[in-house]
Amino acid sequence: MVRSVVMTTPPRRVSVPASVLAGLCGAVLGLLTFATAAALWRAGHGRVAVTLAETMLLTALALVAAIVLLAQPARQRRARVPVGRPMPRTWWPPADDPLPALAVCLGAPVAAGAIAAALLFR
């Protein structure tokens, strides 16, 4: 008995750069922040809307700053290089370190949505 085997091709996977993905997630979070603040403002809770927007802005800025600072190598964070002397090249951060860029790609749209909500619903 001969059976025919149907050969199927595997589905094509699309590769999205991490910075684009982080930017899209940040845009969604920024729009969600703005929409939530708008809904609160429209319901008559203006102070809560402004507080939410300002809290999201401070949270986004604090997280971006923390990620950028903590992404550095430990020896660079606690380096004691005298002023006026160059830092050794081995202490420089790697040129291909994607974490700070991803943090900015994610945090910037969230901060933009929070700023827009805070300014509009004041």
Image (cartoon, rainbow, N blue to C red):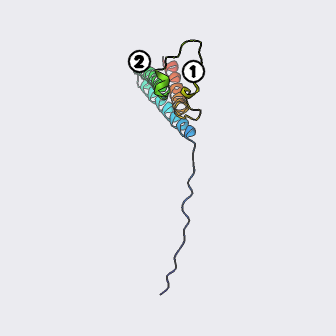
- What residue sits 57% from the left and 39% below the top? 20
Q: Which mark is residue 47?
A: 2
The amino acid at mark 1 is Met
Of 111 and 82, which appears nearest the observer?
82
Of 61 and 37, which appears nearest the observer?
61
- Asked if labels 1 and 2 touch by Cβ distance under 8 angstroms, the answer is no
For disc 2, the neighbor class at 10 Å (few under 14, some 14 to 19, many from 20) is some
For disc 1, the neighbor class at 10 Å (few under 14, some 14 to 19, many from 20) is some
How many labels, in total?
A: 2
Spot the residue most to the bottom: 1
**Foreground disc of the pair 2, 1:** 1
Where residue 30 appears, as percent x and y from the top left, is: 50, 30
| Residue 16 in view | yes
| Labels 2 and 1: the sequence-earlier one | 2
Q: Is residue 9 above or below residue 71?
A: below
Where residue 55 appears, as percent x and y from the top left, is: 42, 22
Q: Which mark is residue 87?
A: 1
- What residue sits 56% from the left and 32% below the top? 94
